[in-house]
Image (tube, grey):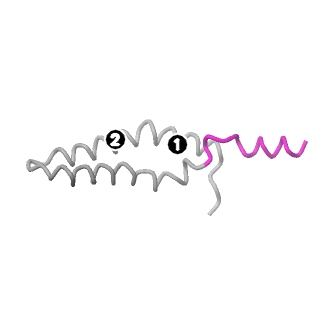
Amino acid sequence: MKPLPYKLRRILTLIALLIVLPIYIFGVVNVLEGSSDRLHWLIEILLYVFFGIIWIFPLRYIVRGVGQENPAIKEANVQK
């Protein structure tokens, strides 16, 4: 699989963190709090921890390496 360009990864990361993640959080909270019968508090905590961790797995391919320097610029500086 060909890696995504650096600029595209940065844009997708920004969209994911500012738009998709809040929608995901809102959905999880509504589903867990919306039922008429509440779950046991320990089960609720475990579900919140599970859903708090699981969101990163689909996004890790996009987010990986975004905080680092652009690889194309890095290679250009090395070749000089």
Q: Is residue 65 left or right of residue 42?
A: right
How packed is label 1: few (under 14 Cα within 10 Å), some, or many (20 or more)? many
Quadrant of res 77: top right
Q: Quadrant of the N terminus?
A: bottom right
Q: How many marks?
A: 2
Residue found at the very far front of the displayed protein: 42
Report x, y in % for residue 69. Answer: 70, 40
Indicate which disc, 2 or 1, sits on the residue closer to the N terminus: 1
Q: Please give the label number shown on residue 23.
A: 2
x 8%, y 50%: residue: 37
Secondary structure type for disc 1: helix
Front one among 76 and 36: 36
x 34%, y 45%: residue: 24
> Identity of the amino acid at label 2?
Ile
Q: Please give the label number shown on residue 13.
A: 1
Residue found at the very far top of the displayed protein: 18
Report x, y in % for residue 20. Answer: 40, 42
Q: Is residue 37 left or right of residue 12?
A: left
Report x, y in % for residue 45. Answer: 26, 49
> Identity of the amino acid at label 1?
Thr
x 46%, y 42%: residue: 16
Q: Which residues are magenta?
A: 65-80
